[in-house]
Amino acid sequence: MWLLYVGLGLIAVIGFLFVFSYFQAKKSSVKMDAENFKQNMRKAQLIDVRNKNEYDAGHINGARNISISMLTREYAKLRKDQPIYLYCDSGKRSSRASVFLRSRGFINIIELKEGLKGWDGPLKEK
């Protein structure tokens, strides 16, 4: 009988963690469509969180490449007094990056809704 309670407790904890992480990601940034993103990104720090090969294959002009795996070491180079515009391929990595940056005290974080899949502008190749 106690095994049933332990199992139910474990399921409840895992469910809570999923709900908690969903709301953390939701409140850590503002998701912006491509048109608004384009209009405002020049006034911000534009960060591509994809890996170097993806970045070299094509990125938004003016973007710096700080991959999601390097962000924990490189975030101190970002300015807290300027907005940060993030993007990746689909929006999943940029959401993780926004949660991380928010936990480090960054406030004005904008994500490209749907990532580059939602982007209709030109891309620069390296």
Image (cartoon, helix red, strand yellow):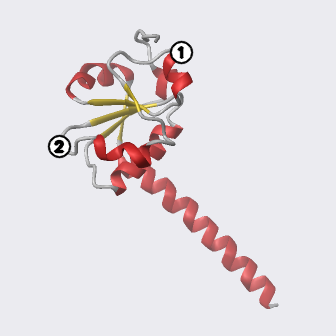
Please tell me the numbered disc located at residue 57. Answer: 1
Q: Nearer the viewer, residue 93 or 55?
A: 55
| Residue at horizontal 53 percent and vertical 15 percent from the top | 57
| Side of 99 where 38 appears, left or right | left
- x, y (%) of residue 96? 48, 46
Q: Residue at x 47, y 28 (%)?
A: 115
Question: 10 Å neighbourhood of mark 2: few (<14), some, or many (≥20)?
Answer: few
What kind of element bears circle 1? Answer: helix
Dividing the picture into quarters, in which one does residue 34 lie? top left
The circle on residue 80 is: none
In the image, residue 109 sits, relative to residue 59, either above or below, namely below
Residue at the (75%, 78%) spot, across then down: 7
Instruction: Determine which residue is flagged by label 2.
Output: 81
Above/below status of 105 relative to 6: above
How far from the left and from the top, in percent, is residue 37? 32, 25
Q: Is residue 13 visible?
A: yes
Q: CA distance from mark 2 to mark 1?
A: 30 Å
**View extreme (left): residue:** 81
Residue 111 on image: x %, y %: 38, 35
Location of residue 24 in the rendering, given as x and y in whole percent from the top left corner: 43, 56
Q: How dense is the environment of label 1, judged by Cα within 10 Å: few (below 14), some, or many (20 and up)?
A: few
Task: Name the kind of residue labelled 1 in the image.
Answer: Ala
Residue at image coords 61%, 65%: 15
Looking at the rendered structure, the secondary structure element under dot 2 is loop
Q: Quadrant of the N terminus?
A: bottom right
Q: Residue furthest bottom?
A: 2
Res. 26 in view: no
Q: Is residue 74 left or right of residue 43?
A: right
Residue 4 picture quarter: bottom right
